[in-house]
Amino acid sequence: MNIKNPQFQISAVSPKQYPKDGLPQIVLVGKSNVGKSSFINTLVNRKKLARTSSEPGKTRQINFYNMDNMFYFVDLPGYGYSKMSKQEQIKVGNFIEEYLENSKQISLIIFLIDIRHEPTANDKLMYDYIFKTNLPCMVIASKADKIAITKVDEAVQKLQDSLNPLKDLKFLPFSSERKIYTQKVWEYIEKFINFNE
């Protein structure tokens, strides 16, 4: 897919700020520093549309990115950053929960997880929570450039065996550096976007 004019729309902290235009929303969930912003930037071929930060846990709001008035990428705050205070972690958790429970426009949840590591306890909690929402979900194994390209498929399989032994969810690798996986990711996302043309 070729997105011609992606735009940052709004950073929301409550449901009254969510866009009300009825466009489908593709939601990104993952721990801090897993690469959600880089994922967006790579898919739309922009370097600085989504704000990346060298400081994990910095995003405390829900960021909506308008994709040519066809759909939104919605970047939820990252979870599980150890230097975030308990109070801040609760606040971030509430943001995520409130959005997932209240938004009626969610078409697909994209759960990003680092391909190099076993899922953490927080990853498993989030996965279970997403699974219980009954919303469509795919899992992106991010940072695939950090391992040998010959080991990517095996690492993705290992993640799926750990999180989704029934294998009823789509798992795909992704790398903002290699960019060789973007086409397959777009092909899957497009299935969940209703184009009103």
Image: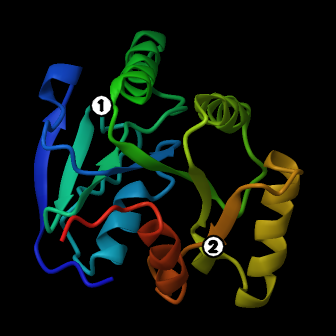
What element does badge 2 sit on? Answer: strand
* Mark toward the start of the polypeptide (1 vs 2): 1
Relative to residue 180, is residue 35 depicted above or below? above
- Is residue 14 among the parts visible in the rendering? no
Residue of label 2: 173
Picture residue at 33% right of the left edge, 61% below the top: 194
Residue of label 1: 60
* Screen quadrant of the C terminus: bottom left
Looking at the picture, how far across and down is residue 74, in whole percent?
Answer: 31, 47
Are the residues flagged by discs 1 and 2 in contact, CB closer than 8 Å? Answer: no
Q: Label 2 sits on what residue type?
A: Pro
* Screen quadrant of the N terminus: bottom left
Picture residue at 62% right of the left edge, 54% below the top: 113
- The residue closer to the viewer here, 147 or 165, is 165
- Is residue 6 among the parts visible in the rendering? yes
- The residue closer to the viewer here, 197 or 75, is 197
Q: Label 2: how many residues lie within 10 Å, few (<14), some (14-19) or many (20+)? A: many
In the image, taking residue 96 as reference, residue 126 lies left or right, namely: right
Outermost residue toward the top in this view: 87
Looking at the picture, how far across and down is residue 143, in whole percent?
Answer: 57, 69
Q: Quadrant of residue 22?
A: top left
Picture residue at 72% right of the left edge, 39% below the top: 120
Looking at the picture, how far across and down is residue 91, in whole percent?
Answer: 38, 15
